[in-house]
Image (cartoon, rainbow, N blue to C red):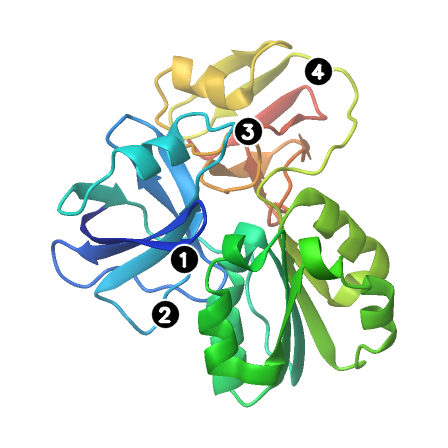
Amino acid sequence: MQRTVLEQVEPVAAGVVSLVLRGAEGPLAPWEPGAHVDLALPNWLIRQYSLCGNPADRDSYRVAVRHDRLSRGGSEYVHLFLRTGRTLEVSVPRNNFNLLPAPEYLFLGGGIGITPIVPMLATAVEAGASATLVYVGRSVATMPFADELRAVYGDRVRIYATDEHGRPDFAALAAALSPRALVYCCGPTSMLDAAETAFPAERTHIERFRPAVKEFAPNKPFEVRCVRSGQTIQVSADESMLDALNHARYRVPSGCREGVCGSCEIAVVDGEPEHRDGIGAPPGRMYCCVSRALSSRLAVDL
């Protein structure tokens, strides 16, 4: 973890604040557009937030937090109690939403899902790519960075306030999409589901704050052999692999516990994992907060 000092808390839309976290011990770890960090809050909660500042700025990170009415304690604490000057620990950035090189881009941002898109758009424009942003929200007042984006990028940005203009026609956008363009989308589940239906899967990249609903076979118990220690852990049908490892005193990091942040990634040496995450584990890896085993035993690098 990296020590930072909360330098600025600024309202950027109705119910949304921007946090600027300055490194307390020198330059912060580098990052690229699409990355997120774990923020350790003083109320013992850890929450994941997309970085929405300038990747070239190694002195500070910027994130934005919407006050969720159904908050589990994270956004509520940020909005009601967090003050400048507070020392906060922040993880090294992780990126499950990498911006791939392309001559053209269509960026789709919905609500607070605009946060990873902001540095993506800046990077694409700086690289000379043709880039368009379609930004959707309930009203302009609730859409963070809307005025800033329009001021900087002009006609590249199309704002859709659904209380005035309705939702954009994704089918029409897909029909007009250049064969050279990549699509990047982050926002509420309904928007992401619509994007997956409308745009070519091989050129569409999506980041979810919540995992897509999927059905799996009933949980079965399995064994986990920790290769480096030689210990074998039993995972029962009613517990997660992460919990079983933690109970056996293996310090596996975790954040969302929903299979979308990637903090609990571990290496699989043998056996067949059942991937239940929402981001797509790399070969030979798995996210043990939600994923299980198709084989009776897994061997992992612990």
How far apart are labels 3 and 1 at the CA level? Answer: 34 Å
Amino acid type, mark 2 = Pro
Q: Quadrant of the C terminus?
A: top left
Amino acid type, mark 1 = Leu
Q: Nearer the viewer, residue 23 or 243?
A: 23
Disc 3 versus disc 4: nearer the observer: 4
Residue that label 4 marks: 219
Which label's residue is closer to the chain start, 3 or 4?
4
Residue that label 2 marks: 55
The secondary structure type at the circle numbered 2 is: loop
Which label's residue is closer to the chain start, 2 or 3?
2
Q: Residues within 10 Å of mark 2 (few under 14, many from 20)?
A: some
Residues at circles 1 and 2 in contact by the CB criterion of under 8 Å: yes
Residue that label 1 marks: 51
Quarter where residue 41 is shown: top left
Quarter where residue 171 is shown: bottom right
Above or below: residue 175 compared with residue 242 = below
Q: Residues within 10 Å of mark 3 (few under 14, many from 20)?
A: many
